[in-house]
Amino acid sequence: MWKGLIEEYKQFLPVTDNTPALTLNEGNTPLIHLVNLSKKLGIELYGKIEGANPTGSFKDRGMVFAVAKAIEDGSKCVICASTGNTSAAAAAYATRAGIQSIVVIPKGKVALGKLAQATMYGAKIIEIDGNFDDALNIVRQVSETTPVALVNSVNPYRIEGQKTASFEIVDALGSAPDYLCIPVGNAGNITAYWKGFKEYHAAKDSGLPKMYGFEAEGAAAIVKGEPIANPETVATAIRIGNPASWKLAEAARDESGGIIDSVTDEEILAAYKLIANTEGIFVEPGSAASLAGVIKSVENGKISKGAKVVTIFTGNGLKDPDTAMDTSTVEVVALKNDEQEIRTYIEGVL
Ligand code: F0G
């Protein structure tokens, strides 16, 4: 039986005898061969389904370790800023470990499912009239002078936990892919994946991918080369104007020979619908940014035909039902509670 990340990967993590055995059995997520999109795009494309983690996003990988280390250091409370997924994961793991969590979120800009999660898991939830960057500044300051452990991805243990996804990809494929495509918000995850690929390569000679990161155009600080005061995108998960791991993301890009590019909201929503209705995989809009980036890069030649590509689907589509219903063009057909009427309709469809 899968024992969770800390136990499974302890030889690659800074685990000590005092690190608690915290887990919700995170990790070990599916890597799915996207057969229909592979054919359409002329590449060998795989999706890593991070929405299959216990709270429905990749944040569980980093959070299990950050919370375990906070407890090892004697903390009784964790705090984070969040566009939603980090807050859900922090709340779940803090509760599991028997400590308090406090989350600071941008008012009106967190998808409904994520807010529901933080509520159910028992976080203290603070919303501000400001964006994620404002919230992160505040919690960074507060955590310096207050006995609360900061569990945003500026916490190095978050990166340690999240790097394990690279190990799983290499184990599933037998070696690193040619390209690793990933959405970029606060830039912790691209940093973590690159660290993971490098460490596995050092241990197992497994090869290194080119790292391709994709920001939403209205929040593309790294692409534009300057912070964005008022970032805007339909992909609220990555609505971030001043990524904390900016320099580390650029290092991942440059060391791997990759790119950081942007995708428009239209491209994100097109990819969001495409992955659901061609492969039966429902991801949240922020996750669709990486597939939008794959499509853009195949079209402009930055991904070569026939290449082996892994795209990271960072969060589950169920987290953001509002965007799904707002963008769906499918109409629900209302019929009478009558077998003949329904039979006639079905015969018309066939
Ligand atoms: N995809 C999803 C679904 C996310 O929730 C995030 C970040 C990212 C991608 C980007 O990852 O920040 O490491 O570059 N969400 C954070 C949060 C900011 O608060 O949940 P990153």
Image (tube, rainbow, N blue to C red):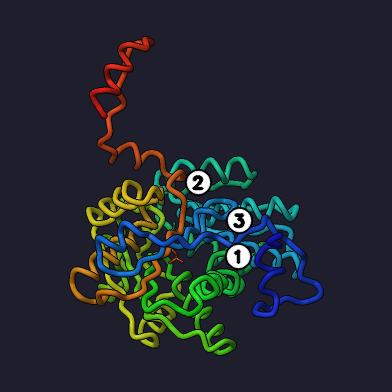
Distance CA(mark 1)–CA(mark 3): 10 Å
Residue for badge 2 = 114
Is residue 231 in view from this perspective? yes
On the rendered structure, is 243 left or right of 60? left
What residue type is disc 1 on? Leu
The image position of residue 160, as x and y in percent, is 59, 74
Which sits earlier in the primary sequence, circle 3 or circle 2?
A: 3
Query: At x 33% / y 81%, what residue is drawn?
Result: 258
Queried on whether the Cβ of the residue with tag 2 lies below 8 angstroms from ligand 1, the answer reads: yes
Residue situated in front as seen by the camera: 218 or 146: 218
The image position of residue 336, as x and y in percent, is 34, 11
What residue type is disc 3 on? Ala
What residue type is disc 2 on? Lys
Residue with the most extreme left position = 300
Query: At x 30% / y 48%, what residue is drawn?
Result: 273
The image position of residue 141, as x and y in percent, is 55, 66
| SS at mark 3 in the image | helix
| SS at mark 1 in the image | strand
Queried on whether the Cβ of the residue with tag 3 lies below 8 angstroms from ligand 1, the answer reads: no
Image: 129 above or below 6: above
Quadrant of the frame with the C terminus:
top left
Distance CA(mark 3)–CA(mark 2): 11 Å
